[in-house]
């Protein structure tokens, strides 16, 4: 077989392993496009939920397209990205709908458009090209860097918006008239056209659309043949660093366990409960126990240490959990208080002891370094506490450098600095002395994420320039400088954002 045939056969093989694939013929063809590989995209509940909504829309059909695992191989074979369902080339769709989860997936957008032979820049496309739209989790924080590349941004929860968009596309007499109409509608941002009053509007889906759940189950994902469903959406907490907090779209909305259970298909052997604060659901223990007592495995996306009980942890163990993962999100109690993370050492120690009592074998703790006003003493506290936890269970410590996000109380907080973060990581590694596993996130790429999170459309142009110049870290540095990318914390704005020097008082801000 030729290299092209081999690559297409790989797609056909994984598609054959799917259960529940949605297939439909319709006039309006929409490419639901994920700018990361299949195993990542098919683990995204939001991506699957919107694909389902497109499938349900009269006169429209959704087909899924993913970033190839080996972009260079597809480029060498001169092969366009194609859909899973029909191997339709990406360039042959009427609408290309990207779901973008976080800043560094921008480069996947570029690669997919390039492979398809489509102009990457919005200004270089014509009416003869597909309409390019984008939505996803990134739109809750800062989608500005996407503006140079998309015709329309769909902002916020898209279950209702996608139907509005498809209606407008189906009824449009021209692309110009379509963009003019969308520019006036809340939830849609049309670069260069939308009014400032609607530019940052974030939509909220109607409760009737909840819960989101998996349409297609496949073994070729991060979550391995797991049926995903959300028992709640949003969060009732006010952590200062988090986009999904109680002020976002009205906070947490819960789904009754009865509704969740009736939507889980009989064929689902593994169930994943997904949400920003699943263990804050008031009936979570009841839901977990019902699932595992039916002989199913279960996983939970977000465990809060202060919500764990022995019954809850035992249900997780019965459902197949070998490890327990909780987030500390502050190297010391002072830092956790500063970011309004409502966890104490006592609660995290209790989580470790509950895990041990339930027979769980390991503990994973997520943490963050580089917060405003952080000192080496805070890192020493993290080391001391991690070693204390390691005497209860083996510990894997995941550490990410703090990168401030737009539309949070910490919006505008400065990045600590690559050398400073690396020094913090070295301090942790030295202090642990191998008695707990350290899993750090790169300080350099955290800085790139921070720049994209805090910059405007010029950040997107810098990302495209870095991508074209090989994508190495040095290329990103040069591109940010060449495109005059200045984080919001360094600007003297008139819209009420704080200066970097004022961030030590952030812990006193009301939620």
Image (tube, rainbow, N blue to C red):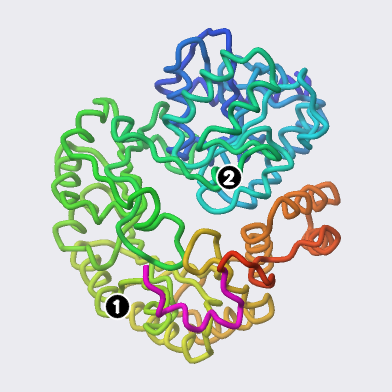
Per the image, the residue denoted by label 2 is: 199
Q: Which of 81/323 is in front?
A: 81
If you read the primary sequence from the N terminus, does the residue marked by circle 2 or circle 1 appear first?
A: 2
Q: Residue 109: x percent and y percent?
A: 69, 39
Is residue 416 on the magenta stretch?
no
Find the distance from the CA under tag 2 to the CA under tag 1.
39 Å
Asked if residue 430 lies left or right of residue 256, the reply is right
Expressed as whole percent of the image width and height from the top left, the position of residue 496 reads 56, 68
Q: Image quadrant of residue 367?
A: bottom left
**x then y, percent, for residue 25:** 53, 7
Measured as percent of width and height from the top left, residue 493 is found at: 65, 68
Circle 1 sits on which residue? 344
Q: Identify which residue is drawn at 67% across, 29% down.
A: 132
> Which mark lies nearer to you, 2 or 1?
2
Q: Which quadrant would the N terminus be assigned to in this image? A: top right
Q: Nearer the viewer, residue 424 or 56?
A: 56
In the image, is residue 284 above or below residue 453?
A: above
The residue sitting at 36% across, 52% down in the picture is 276
Q: Which residues are magenta?
A: 497-511
Report how many numbered discs are placed on residues in the image: 2
């Amino acid at each position: 077989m030729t290299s092209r045939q081999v690559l297409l056969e790989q797609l056909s093989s994984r598609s054959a392993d799917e259960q529940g694939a949605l297939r439909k013929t319709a006039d309006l063809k929409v490419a639901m496009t994920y700018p990361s590989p299949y195993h990542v995209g098919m683990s995204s509940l939001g991506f699957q939920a919107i694909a389902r909504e497109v499938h349900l829309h009269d006169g429209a059909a959704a087909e899924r397209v993913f970033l190839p695992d080996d972009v260079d191989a597809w480029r060498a074979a001169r092969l366009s990205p194609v859909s899973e369902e029909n191997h339709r080339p990406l360039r042959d769709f009427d609408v290309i709908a990207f779901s973008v989860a976080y800043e560094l997936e921008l480069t996947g957008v570029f690669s997919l458009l390039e492979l398809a032979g489509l102009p990457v820049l919005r200004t270089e496309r014509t009416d003869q090209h597909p309409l390019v739209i984008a939505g996803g989790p990134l739109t809750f924080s800062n989608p500005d860097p996407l503006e140079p590349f998309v015709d329309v941004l769909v902002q916020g929860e898209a279950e209702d918006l996608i139907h509005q968009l498809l209606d407008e596309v189906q009824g449009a007499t021209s692309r110009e008239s379509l963009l003019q109409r969308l520019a006036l509608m809340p939830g849609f941002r049309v670069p260069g056209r939308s009014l400032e009053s609607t530019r940052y509007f974030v939509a909220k889906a109607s409760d009737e659309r909840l819960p989101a759940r998996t349409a297609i189950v496949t073994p070729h994902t991060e979550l391995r043949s797991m049926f995903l469903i959300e028992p709640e959406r949003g969060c009732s907490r006010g952590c200062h660093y988090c986009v999904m907090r109680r002020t976002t779209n009205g906070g947490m909305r819960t789904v009754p366990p009865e509704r969740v259970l009736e939507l889980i298909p009989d064929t689902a052997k593994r169930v994943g409960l997904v949400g920003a604060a699943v263990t804050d659901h008031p009936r979570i223990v009841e839901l977990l126990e019902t699932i595992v007592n039916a002989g199913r495995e279960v996983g939970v996306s977000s465990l809060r240490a202060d919500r764990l009980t022995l019954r809850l942890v035992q249900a997780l163990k019965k459902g197949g959990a070998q490890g327990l993962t909780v987030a500390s999100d502050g190297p010391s109690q002072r830092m956790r208080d500063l970011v309004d993370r409502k966890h104490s050492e006592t609660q995290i120690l209790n989580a470790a002891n509950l895990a041990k009592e339930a027979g769980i074998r390991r503990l994973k703790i997520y943490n963050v370094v580089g917060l405003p006003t952080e000192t080496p003493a805070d890192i020493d506290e993290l080391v001391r506490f991690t070693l204390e936890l390691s005497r209860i269970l083996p510990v894997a410590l995941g550490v990410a450098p703090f990168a401030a996000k737009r539309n949070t109380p910490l919006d505008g907080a400065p990045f600590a600095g690559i050398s400073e973060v690396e020094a913090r990581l070295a301090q942790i590694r030295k202090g642990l002395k191998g008695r707990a596993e350290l899993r750090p996130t790169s300080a350099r790429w955290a800085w790139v994420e921070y720049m994209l999170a805090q910059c405007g459309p010029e950040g997107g142009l810098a990302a495209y320039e870095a991508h074209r110049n090989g994508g190495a870290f040095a290329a990103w540095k040069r591109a940010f400088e060449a495109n005059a990318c200045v984080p919001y914390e360094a600007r003297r704005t008139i819209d009420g954002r704080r200066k970097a020097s004022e961030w030590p008082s952030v812990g006193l801000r009301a939620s």
